Amino acid sequence: MLSEDGLKVSVTTRFPPSPTGDLHIGGVRTALFNWLFARSQGGRFILRIEDTDKNRSTDEAIEGIIKGLDWLGLDFDEGPIFQTERLDRYAEVIEKLLEDGSAYRCYCTKERLDGLREAQIAKKEKPRYDGLCRDLDPTIIRTEQFVVRLKTPKEGKVGLSDIVQGDVVYDNSELDDMIIARGDGSPTYHLAAVVDDIDMGITHVIRGDDHLNNTPRQMHIYRALGEPYPHYAHIPMIHGQDGKKLSKRHGALSILEYQKAGFLAEAVINYLSRLGWSWGDKEIFELEELLTAFNLTDVNKAAAKFDIEKLNWVNHQHMIASSLDRLVTLVKPYLHSDPVTCDSRSMRVVELQRERAKNLVDLAKSSDYFFEAPQQYQPKHSKKFLTEMTRPILKQLQDELELLTDWQIALLDEIIEKVCQERGLGMGKVAQPLRVALTGSTSSPGIGETMFLIGRNEVLKRLAAAMKFIDNNHNET
């Protein structure tokens, strides 16, 4: 990437989550855009954990963030860097700002500030600090507890040329002297974020547009420290289909819940990359294509809408395109049966079943019976197809199959047709009871291929179990 003066700039981006809860779709999309931009520009991507809120930060949340990024393949070049390990650095910067007069100690009590806020609201004024302590003699240190505030210019404007939002300008008169250090000396979010971005060489701050109003405040910290501003790109928020803020009912779940639900990582990457980013009508992207095509200038201003059905469709497309051996490996953890080997049989099962599966959970659910006998028959199907009337059919099938030495699909189909002809029955009258006996339901690929894939011994064993089920039910009635 080239700077305005034509010099090559080494791009560095960061993802700075607060570990106070799960990593959700919105956060993942922000991480993804930072990662895509850095990788597409040959730059660096840093993971920073903003854990200064000690009361709410948890080790579980940190672990979830790292696991989620790892599952998606969003590798970072540096980190995780923890803000709690940089407190001395923040204290050093705060002291510098106090010494050069860019910040000051504020001794106002909570009671005074609450009263000030109430009075301003009553007058229909914008609540803000009135600067009472701004001009106190800094050489006189009082005994009361204090916070540290940044001296914000009272006049003029501060503006930025945002890559996504365009030119944005704020009147300094609309900003008050923000707190940069709390009463216990700990830094506030704005101070810590800016110091980190400076120290880590962040060239592009890519974040949700809910942070846009934070930017002028942070730019004043850069100014006070004599540091150049980074490039800003405030990307649109993600809403539900109803246009409201994304919530759990819309799909704002932990990213690890999507992994648990059987989505492919590359499908989630593909789908999230298109939330707010335009690239013609193309919907399905491989990762290399995304790295080539992605550009911040193509990100829209308008809020993106999360659509779980669209995600399901994208996931299905990636499952169809995935290699069979990889898909077998991915579906293994979701199967109820014993560990499945990646052989020609299991690959054929996956090839047959993935056409009707939205995700790995669906694929496993529809494939389990190939590897393990059904634990139970679906009641409505067993009531209709596993009866005294169908028992002779199953018995004849069992007898014929026991004589078959060459277990091939064509020969299996011939046996079923033979039973149909000898009993004067249509294919459904024979195939459906057989299918329920073998799979537990009436849905499976072609019955001949289903029998072939289940295997000779297992088919005979399941037929015996089905007839025993019929006998037991008959005796009970």
Image: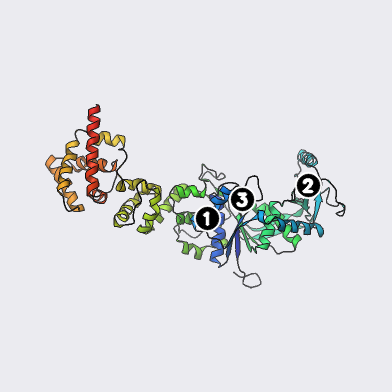
- Place of residue 376 in the rendered image (x, y in percent of width and height, measured from the top left): 31, 38
Q: How many marks?
A: 3
Residue beneath label 2, please? 129
- Mark 2 surroundings: few (<14), some (14-19) or many (≥20) residues within 10 A: some
Give the CA distance from mark 3 to mark 2: 27 Å
Q: Is residue 359 visible?
A: no
Give, as a three-letter code, the residue at label 3.
Ser
Sequence-wise first label, 2 or 1: 1
The reply, left or right, for residue 436 in relation to residue 160 is: left
- Place of residue 286 in the rendered image (x, y in percent of width and height, measured from the top left): 45, 61
- Place of residue 96 in the rendered image (x, y in percent of width and height, measured from the top left): 78, 59
Closer to the camera in the image, 400 or 292: 400
Numbered label attached to residue 87: none
Residue beneath label 3, please? 18
The reply, left or right, for residue 451 in relation to residue 404 is: right
Residue beneath label 1, please? 69
Looking at this view, name the residue that lies furthest to the left. 422
Tell me, yes or no, whether the two marked residues, 3 and 1, touch with CB atoms within 8 Å: no
Closer to the camera in the image, 61 or 269: 61
Point out the frontmost of discs 3 and 2: 3
Q: Residue at x 34, y 56 (%)?
A: 342
Give, as a three-letter code, the residue at label 2.
Tyr
- Mark 3 surroundings: few (<14), some (14-19) or many (≥20) residues within 10 A: many
Image quadrant of residue 421? top left
- Place of residue 30 in the rendered image (x, y in percent of width and height, measured from the top left): 57, 55
Q: Element type at marker 3?
A: loop
- Mark 1 surroundings: few (<14), some (14-19) or many (≥20) residues within 10 A: many
Residue 343's place in the image compared with 445, above or below, is below
The reply, left or right, for residue 179 in relation to residue 315 is: right
Sequence-wise first label, 3 or 1: 3
Give the CA distance from mark 2 to mark 1: 40 Å
